[in-house]
Image (tube, rainbow, N blue to C red):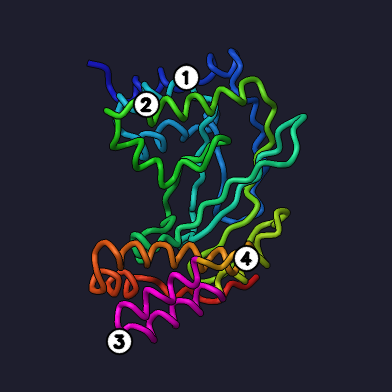
Amino acid sequence: MRTKTAFFRGWIGLVACVAALGAPVVEIVPSAVPGVALSGPSAPDFASRLAGILPDEEVLNRLKPAAGNILILTNSTLRAIVFYTLRFEIEGQQPVKTVSADFDDPAIGGKTHSFKPESYRLVSIVRGLDPVSDGLATESRNPEVYRQFLADSARYSGARVRVSLDSVVFDDGQFSGPDRTGMFDRLRQQSAARHALLEEIRSLDASPDAALQSRLEGILANTSTDAAAMKQKALARSFDAVLRRRGHGAMKIMLENMVDYPAIRR
């Protein structure tokens, strides 16, 4: 039986072959955020970290055709990350592609759903693989998960790609990064809107469900596309779904699990 070390040596060896056959040629810009960095298959610890994220050989075998399209984002700090943005500059293509991960997901609370200290995650030019990487790790019997990822990856075959970490928000509210995408102002608006909506829903907790439902429907009917309105609509959509399907008690539990993050600051 092959040892896991031998298996990953073979898998990383395949990365070089895939790259030669037309995978994206990726240049990783050194991170401007201390303690948070991107690495690719050529990094010495890439195989061991990949093993920690996707320990199932069946999963890795399914991903082999896109081996050159997978990167690892490492959080070596002592703080959790609640948001980050990556920039993918693809030669000959405009606009610049960005991938963001926002761990403020009301459907699962927020107390534990974050990019934890001393941990790492998969990312890709196709999409941010987290929280999808959990699905990749556990849905090895669902080939559609992999077919879609591989099909999306094929669109970037042979492309020259420059990838950089553009912004990070830690759980203490600190914003860091060059922010060429202008996320700081957008996130501050979203943070204020989020706080205001949570306070409003808490104030309506003792009201009849019909009153709460009416307020959520009013938010969902808002046609504004600014950052604050879109954030409130996303939250309202989740609260509305739980209230309708599982009742007030379940919605109250979800509300109690929502984290009041500190104000975002540089």
Q: Is residue 262 left or right of residue 228?
A: left
Give the mark nearest the N terminus, 1 or 2: 2
C-alpha gap between disc 3 and disc 4: 29 Å
Residue at figure coordinates x 38%, y 23% from the top left = 62
How much space separates mark 4 and mark 2, taking CA atoms? 43 Å
Q: Quadrant of the N terminus?
A: top left
Q: Are marks 1 and 2 in contact (CB under 8 Å)?
A: no
Main SS class of the magenta portion in the image: helix
Q: Which residue is mark 3?
A: 206
Residue type at mark 1 is Pro
Name the residue tied to disc 4. 224
Name the image quarter holding the C terminus.
Answer: bottom right
Q: What amino acid does circle 2 point to? A: Leu
Tell me the element at label 3: loop
Up-down: is 105 above or below 153? below
Q: CA distance from mark 1 to mark 3?
A: 54 Å
211 is higher (above) or lower (below) than 153: below
Please check the rendered image and state whether residue 67 is part of the magenta-colored stretch, yes or no.
no
Residue 133 falls left or right of residue 92: left
Q: Which residue is denoted by mark 2 in the rendering?
A: 60
User: Magenta span covers which residues?
Assistant: 192-220
Between residues 9 and 240, which one lies in front from this camera angle? 240
Check disc 1 and report the residue beneath it.
Answer: 65
